Amino acid sequence: MRHIRAALLVAAIMIVPTTVACGGTSDTAAPEAPAVAKDCPSSPMPANPAGGNGPAAAVATPTIVVPVDTSTSTVLRPGTAAQIQCGRTPVTTHSDLTYATVPLVDGQGKQLAMDIQVPQTAGPKPLVVYVPGGGFVMADKGGNLALRTFVAEAGYVVASIQYRVQPDGATYADSISDVKAAIRYLRAHAAEYDINPGSVGVWGDSAGGYLAAMTGVSNGDKRYDIGADLDQSSDVQAVIDKFGAADLSRVQADFDPDTQRAMAPLLASTARYVNGPTSTASLADDPAAVARANPITYIKPNDPPFVIFHGSVDTTISPSQTLELHNALRAAGVDSTRYVVEGAAHGDVAFTGSPQNSLQWTTQDVAGRLVDFLNQHLER
């Protein structure tokens, strides 16, 4: 199994505002043309797709041996033809803004950056903080550009963030702290980016989905509020979890025996992400530590509403992971909706490495439901 060791390179950080409509820089000298819908911008093809960190990279045909349970979920059959379009709403993009400088285990500091997309519409807008995936070993804020732009054009400020990962010597608690630091930073700078600070959602894919869930269920828990802007709240009002893990001790449980054996290096890396960079303990050695890293442990009746998406043929994170979280949220009285997307694998091109294998996630049906959830739960 490949173990991606992708260091996040952050150059001299500066604000670079450009007005874009679906990724293109506007020409202020030319007369304004009517808005025309067109394909949303695509992220660059990753050199090392995040999905290469999962079981699909380890065996030729990884198999989920547990049937996909949709009894408490809604099944979507979007096909791939009706894709989202962008271009009707101009969006200003601010790239590579440093939101925090955080310590690493070697004593060095690391600058964490974000990209912010602001739709050019009147008045303050709700904020959505996007947490990219990457198997806890990378966090590329440039991913999922098409869907981020689509959400921004729907009237939301969208901030895609970097965070510390396991190769930095980070644990899950460090990553959660980074997400919350980004939320506080954006609330502190709400006026600069036309943000309504009282209306914040968090959205993540894969490892980012896990972190989004942990961020939501830890509303009010100050142990993760570390760093600057501590006069600002890190609480969120809505959570979008797309195919994220929930119980890190069971990420291999639903796979065939060959895949489970091949996942051993990934599980060892995940154990260090839970227990600390110098720990030699496995996930099975300390159940209490794993429980502390499980969002289900922290669920409360007053948690923010969740919407959860999972592909029916995901062979990187088993659909049972989000099912477990969804059922626990509902049992506690939390508003949770879960969609199983028929025929969908593990996410966008950043995970699959293939645009054709990720088209279900950028259909009007699936993306429209994500925006509908935000419209229902984030005030303008």
Image (tube, grey):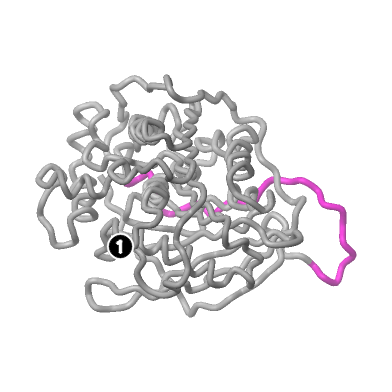
Q: Nearer the viewer, residue 104 or 237?
A: 237
| In the image: residue 2, left or right of residue 374 | left
Q: Position of residue 311 (x, y in %)?
A: 45, 31
Quarter of the image containing the N terminus?
A: top left
Q: Position of residue 240 (x, y in %)?
A: 49, 44
Q: Is residue 228 above or below residue 156?
A: below
Which residue is depicted at the point 65% across and 37% down? 83
Q: Nearer the viewer, residue 73 or 361?
A: 73
Label 1 sits on residue: 223
| In the image: residue 221, left or right of residue 12 | left
Residue 214 visible in the displayed image: yes
Q: Nearer the viewer, residue 116 or 135?
A: 116
Which residue is depicted at the point 34% across and 30% down? 320
Q: Is residue 61 above or below residue 58?
A: above
Which residue is depicted at the point 9% across and 45% down? 285
The residue segment tinted magenta is 27-53
Q: Is residue 195 magenta?
A: no
* Image-quadrant location for residue 258: top left
Q: Position of residue 290 (x, y in %)?
A: 20, 46
Give the secondary structure at mark 1. helix
Residue 24 visible in the displayed image: no
Q: Position of residue 330 (x, y in %)?
A: 41, 32
- Tell me the amino acid under the disc marked 1: Arg
* Image-quadrant location for residue 121: bottom right
